[in-house]
Amino acid sequence: MERLRSSDPARIADHRLLGRLGAGGMGVVYLARTSAGSLVALKVLATEYAEDAGFRARFRREVEVARRISSPWAVPLVDADAEAAAPWLATAYVPGPSLAEAVAAYGPLGEHGLRILGGRLALALGEVHRAGLVHRDLKPGNVLLAPDGPRLIDFGIARAPEDTALTATGFVVGTPGYLSPEQADGRDGRTIGAPSDVFSLGCVLAFAATGRPPFGTGALDALLYRAVHDPADLDGVPGPLVELLSRCLEKDPARRPEVEELVRELLPEEAAEGSASQDVAAGSAPQETAEGSASRGAAAGSASGAAVQGSASTESADGSGARSGEDGETSEEPADAPADRPGAVAPADVAPASWLPDEVVRLIARRSTEALALPDIDHTEISGDASRAAAVRGGDSPSGTGPQRSASDDDTASPAPGAGDTVPTAATDTPEAPARRRVLLAGAGALLAAGGGTTWWALGRDGGSGDKKPAATSSRRPAHTVALHGDLSGDQRATGEAQERGLRLAVAEFNARKDAPFQVDVRAVDDAGDPAEAARLAKQLADDPSVLAVVGPTTDATAQSALAAYDAGLLPVLTVSPGAISLAVQGFRSFLNARLPDTVLSVYLDAVLRGTRPRKVGVVVDRAADNYGAEISSTLSKQLKTAGQPFLPRVVSPMRSGFGDAVDDLLAADIDSIAFAGLPDRAASFARTLHERGFSGARASGPALLDPRFLTEAKEAAEGWTIVAPVVDTANTPEAKAFVDAYRKRWKQAPPRYAAEAYDVTSMVLTSLADLPSKSRTREELLAALRAAKYQGITRTYGFQKNGLPTIDGTGGYLWRVEDGAFVYGGPAPLTA
């Protein structure tokens, strides 16, 4: 959560604003306190959308739908004004993470947790369906976790099946990867009913059980196709639940179980009791309905009383109410307080958090504490429409950093950075916090300490710069940290190390400036290419408030595992080598991809192939390459088809060890140019087969083949292959001469691929940070500055779209060709044939 800005109003209606939780699809979400002293999440429609009749209608519908839902497992609506100049709604505040965030950071749930999750969500969906509605967008990001059970959120596109006001036939509504086949097909909304939500629930449970969506990731059209035609991937789902999830994921809606059946199978004890308030494994369930909560003005506190009582204090409206400590004891609270009210206590003989991993419980506790560790707020006076406009400025997202470890917590675990890279200092550019805040922060720090220390892997290979004199003003300058998250010891260590050195060089140059307004520390962490380790390290970096930006990770897989943790801390993360489009479509707010995604590089690949004036192009898709192969081939095939170029696709199973049959089929079809969508090892096998058959036509592929393993394994068969990649050769880039000279001076060798790109991105981060006022050098402000920036680097001009992808300006794709057993740079790739 971020502090309020000076431009934010102190109140909206009767709600006192305490901080910024983030930005939804249509505006800003604040943490606020009601006149009764309860905490709520207050969502305000942004001014530009409030004036749009369509968006206002959707917002009005979300309010109407939320009022009709009465379930302890759906976040209740507390108050709303859909007709205000800046429409707003307030729901109970849930301090827990989303299911997507928790699974990405801490791994899948066990069978017990899955039963609680599925059963309680089924109960929530039952209430939605009894209200005559269909949720339509059930996904991990719309499920929040509390110690006593999940909470379903976001009714922005829920509607009755017969309601066609907001959708039309052929228009897909929802999130690909979690859509039912009838949604993916774009069928008439009247045919999409409760079974569609059951299918989506099956997808959510499969994700929670395995850590991956049941229909994979990748291009959107591929996700929609798989939902309609392919079987779900349930490998890793606990045995007793496989059959039930298989039925939920039936293609035929009529064959899916009803939600009541799901409750009976997942929570038989609760179903036997016949009461949604019976908590099978996690204490007393919340008793309040949405309407009851709103009328009493009390249920808007933590949506999980256990989260508040177990780790944080709560206050009454005047700030003098009873407080609960970390030991779970409370005072001055009625014994019959419902669990959704502050101070509610679960029975002593149950374990409220038993369904969640301990790490998630600690995260909920920390966020509960953070909600209370807030500075006093002056009542700013902004009159009329100006106050509403100030309240709804878009583009803000929660940092999630809150009260965290001090920088000193890591001092003993962090090897000293290389000389010339960092200048440690005790100075800070932030004012001292009030006494109350210091006490609360100390409590939160104790919670974090209980979760274990941070292990940092900082490289000591630099050997220093040779300059042993500290900067003259280092003792008076504040210090900020930029981190490198990379594969520094695994299969992609060459790329990871190149990025680390590029980052360190940029930081060293910045620190050497006499006018530098602050000094920069470097931290490098090594995930060795392991996704699980990447998630753990990302959480450590996100939890360290001194870290303001991260460059990395190195691969698609490690980025996929790490981004949720970075997003939870709103820690800006800029990648220079991952290229999966799926990273950008998941809505991570702090993710900025500084290279063209693989789907865009395929446009250049199309131009390269058609530039040879082929009769027919063969497009070989190696399923062993999973999403990478699908993204490269999907866009390429569309481009060829649009251009009227004859082509023949061939899909090769990962079970096949050779490509002889596929090559023979292609040659028999009079193919004279070939594109291969796959990874280096199997590409080498394919290249050798082509070479053995005497094929001499054009051969091209994407960035994965710009790897020494392709040269080593393909040998002479690699000769003549053309590769489109998002990386330059600095030796042949005039703008990079100074960089090349500095790199050679420091590391006694030419810069490897991706070093210059990391140097550029790091320089962009430092320039943007230096341009901010000292009090605004926060993660949130830096992220906003980076999103708005246009930075001219030595490799290209950098800028970002709203979804975090790079600005598409006709640059960013480069040609490489294999000549005499080496990769030879060919300059910018053409966009047209």
Image: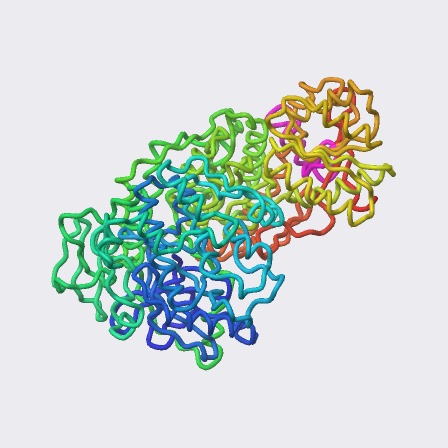
Residue 726: say if magenta.
Answer: yes
Q: Is residue 241 left or right of residue 331?
A: right
* 429, above or below 475, in the image: below
Toward the bottom, the furthest residue is 384
- Look at the image and name its color scheme: rainbow
At 40% across and 64% down in the image, what residue appears? 129
Residue 289: say if magenta.
Answer: no
Q: Nearer the viewer, residue 671 or 499?
A: 671
Residue 220, image x and y in percent? 60, 49
Q: Is residue 669 left or right of residue 125?
A: right
Toward the front, the furthest residue is 254
Q: Is residue 110 left or right of residue 710?
A: left
* 821, above or below 563, in the image: above
Q: Nearer the viewer, residue 121 or 107?
A: 121
Magenta-highlighted residues: 723-751
At 74% across and 23% down in the image, what residue appears? 718
Q: Is residue 445 left or right of residue 688?
A: left
Q: Nearer the viewer, residue 782 or 800?
A: 800
Q: Quadrant of residue 164?
A: bottom right
Any part of residue 549 in sight: yes
At 49% across and 43% down in the image, what residue appears? 214
| Quadrant in which the N terminus appears | bottom left
Residue 276, image x and y in percent? 27, 59
At 55% across and 69% down in the image, what residue appears? 166
Residue 290, image x and y in percent? 31, 69
* 193, above or below 380, in the image: above
Residue 806, image x and y in percent? 63, 49
How many dots with numbers?
0
* 514, above or below 754, in the image: below
Any part of residue 439 in sight: no
| Quadrant in which the C terminus appears | top right
